[in-house]
Structure formats: structure tokens, C-alpha cells
Amino acid sequence: MEILNSHITINVKDLDQSIQFYEKIGFHLQQKWGNHYAQLTAKGIEIGLHPSSNPSMDNHQAGISIGLTSKDFKATKEELLELGISVTERNEEGGGFLHFNDPDGTALYFIQPKW
């Protein structure tokens, strides 16, 4: 079996708001199919956004986190803060982390790995 591509689909409450959020942090909208699905990409990752009116969506996407890296960790933190995105910084043996959430509570982080 050969995997040609991969992506993560995230259920969201407001498709347009989520597209705007992901574009602000560096993703590019590839295609949008009405209010049914949107495909966004950044270097090395593709995500899909799918609207959901599931009442169990309680601002937490259990088991999903999206990890990203950047060229300038300090500048990335400053940009996130300028965008009004709340960031929690954490440092550990593996590196530095900037944790934040999308509008629906999906966990994202930038890592500055020590390796």
C-alpha cells in the first residue's frame, strides 16, 4: 500500500472564521466547496476544515493537535500575539513550544526543536 498524500480534517463551527484564522498563521486556501469543506496547505501539511453542528463540540477537539515549525521562533510568538492569539509558552528537553488554539479549540503549537 502506497500513501500518496495525507491530511487532517478538523470539524469547525464557523468555516469562514476558521479559514481566516488558519490563513493568518500561514496556511493558504487551496479550495473551498461552498460551506461544506475547505482545503488549506502550508509547507509539509494539508488540512481540511469541515463545518459541524454537532452539539458535543465543546471548544475541544479531543486527540487532535497540529505541530508547526518556523524559521524565527521569537518573531512567530510576536506575530501570534499581534494577531490577538493567546499563546502559552513551554520549554522542555525536546525544545520550546508555543501552544495556542483555533476558534473551535483545536490545539496547535509551534516548536523550536533542540535537535
Image (cartoon, rainbow, N blue to C red):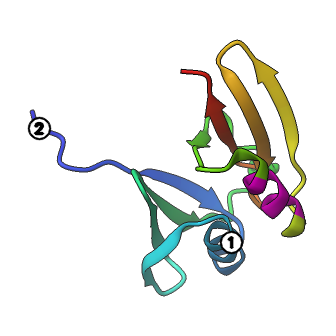
Identify which amino acid the numbered label 1 is placed on.
Answer: Lys
Q: Is residue 44 magenta?
A: no
Per the image, the residue denoted by label 2 is 2
In the current view of this chain or complex, which residue is farthest to the left?
Answer: 1
Residue drawn where x is 75% and y is 48% of the image: 56
Q: Provide the secondary structure element on which disc 1 rests.
A: helix
Question: Is residue 8 visible to us here?
Answer: yes
Report crowding for label 2: few under 14, some 14 to 19, many 20 or more residues within 10 A (C-alpha).
few
Q: Quadrant of the N terminus?
A: top left
Q: Position of residue 10 (x, y in %)?
A: 56, 54
Above or below, comparing residue 27 to residue 72 in the picture: below
Answer with left or right where residue 62 lies relative to residue 27. Answer: right
Per the image, the residue denoted by label 1 is 24
Residue drawn where x is 76% and y is 56% of the image: 75
Point out the frontmost of discs 1 and 2.
1
Q: Position of residue 89 (x, y in %)?
A: 85, 36
Q: Is residue 79 magenta?
A: yes
Q: Which residues fall within the magenta stretch?
A: 75-81
Question: Is residue 37 visible to us here?
Answer: no
